[in-house]
Image (cartoon, helix red, strand yellow):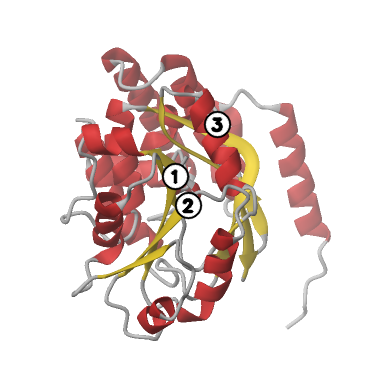
Amino acid sequence: MKVSVLIPVYNKAPYLRDCLDSVYAQTHADLEVLAVDDASTDESLALLRAETDPRLRVIALPENRGPGGAANAGLEAATGTYIVRLDADDIALPDRVERQVAYMEAHPEVGASGGRVDLFGAEGASRAFPLEHDACMAELLFGVPVSQGASILRTSTIRERELRYETSWPRIGEDWLFWTRMGRVARFGNIAAPVIRYRRGAQNLGHGRDKVADHEVLLREVFAWYGIPLSERDLTLHLLTLRLFREAPTAGLVEAYRDWLDRLQALVLERGLFPGEAFRRRIATAWGGLFHYLADRDRGAALAHLRLSGWRRDHALYLMKHWTHGLLRPRHRR
């Protein structure tokens, strides 16, 4: 079964060797590799054209179209039953394609799926994504349900539903908007195993950017897609679900945030926009996950969260230990 591995490339010359070798070495051998050079200004295109593996097809765009435009060129050229996405500075684990094809074959209702992402480079960690469709759908107001660079797409879904990246979308976070479109026509899923090593560093497109400003644009787009009203104050509050602050945390901000989550949940459940139980769990995660951020920043805000949570014992103990540690910390004399 042929699989198309789609690799958009823009100024990633230092990382192409590792990326391509990780694809050539896949345990699933029936591959075509589509490298779409997005008018790179470094040696990326020359390096791609010097490759000799017969499975590689190089598509050189005449002008820079951004990540979405480069992806569209690859989606249109793909001939495989499945399309596997990979960023040009990342590394696919050897059995990635084999594992993901097996999952898609076992779940014919799924249009897109992914797996865990192991981070390396400037920051080492691991990021997991929801395994089941309902939880993936509930994630769509808060972030991506599937890692784009770790995803596999069913080509027939892409073709039949005419799914594409819109030219009007921002160049940061276009994957989030693509998944909102996918979620209307197909199901999601993820496997628990890692499938790629994701390189963190200055070469990342979002490195050094204003995350609050970027997410303001994305959230307005996402909420508009679902027809959910989003005032400027609501936007400020919803950014807290992403641990992004437009203003310093206070008790009043925490109280307003709790009210926003309650209003959002009521609206989503009333309209049936997302699976109810999964969305309730996601709201609970958004609320509970903010506590430790508050405890490290503002005592009044943390106490407000504790009170509105019904004085959770684990949170109360954490706050007590945090404050005690602060009181016992040696202070420098002037």
**Residue topped by disc 2:** 31
Residue 82 found in image quarter:
top left
Few, some or many residues within 10 Å of mark 1 (<14, 14–19, 20+): some
Which residue is drawn at the image coordinates 63% and 54% (left, top)? 93
Where in the figure is residue 130, as x and y percent of width and height?
Answer: 54, 33
Measured in 3D between alpha carbons, the distance from the residue under mark 1 to the one under mark 2, in whole angstroms, is: 5 Å
Residue farthest along the front direction in this orientation: 54
Find disc 3 in the rendering and name its residue: 103
Q: Are marks 3 and 1 in contact (CB under 8 Å)?
A: no
Label 3 and label 1: CA atoms lie apart by 15 Å
Residue at the spot x=43%, y=54% of the render? 245
Secondary structure at numbered mark 1: loop
Horizontal side of residue 41 vs 250, given as left or right: left
Q: Earlier in the sequence, mark 2 or mark 3?
A: 2
Judge the density around disc 2: few (<14), some (14-19), many (≥20) Cα neighbours within 10 Å.
Answer: many
Residue 129 showing in the rendered view: no
Q: Are marks 1 and 2 in contact (CB under 8 Å)?
A: yes
Q: Which amino acid type is marked by label 1?
A: Lys
Is residue 83 visible in the rendered image? The answer is yes
Nearest the eye: 272 or 82: 82
Give the camera-side residue of 171 and 159. Answer: 159
| Left or right placement of residue 67 versus residue 252 in this view | left
Against 220, residue 44 (above or below) is below
| 47 w.r.t. 110: above or below | below
Return the mark for residue 2.
1
Q: What residue sits 47% from the left and 74% below the top?
A: 52
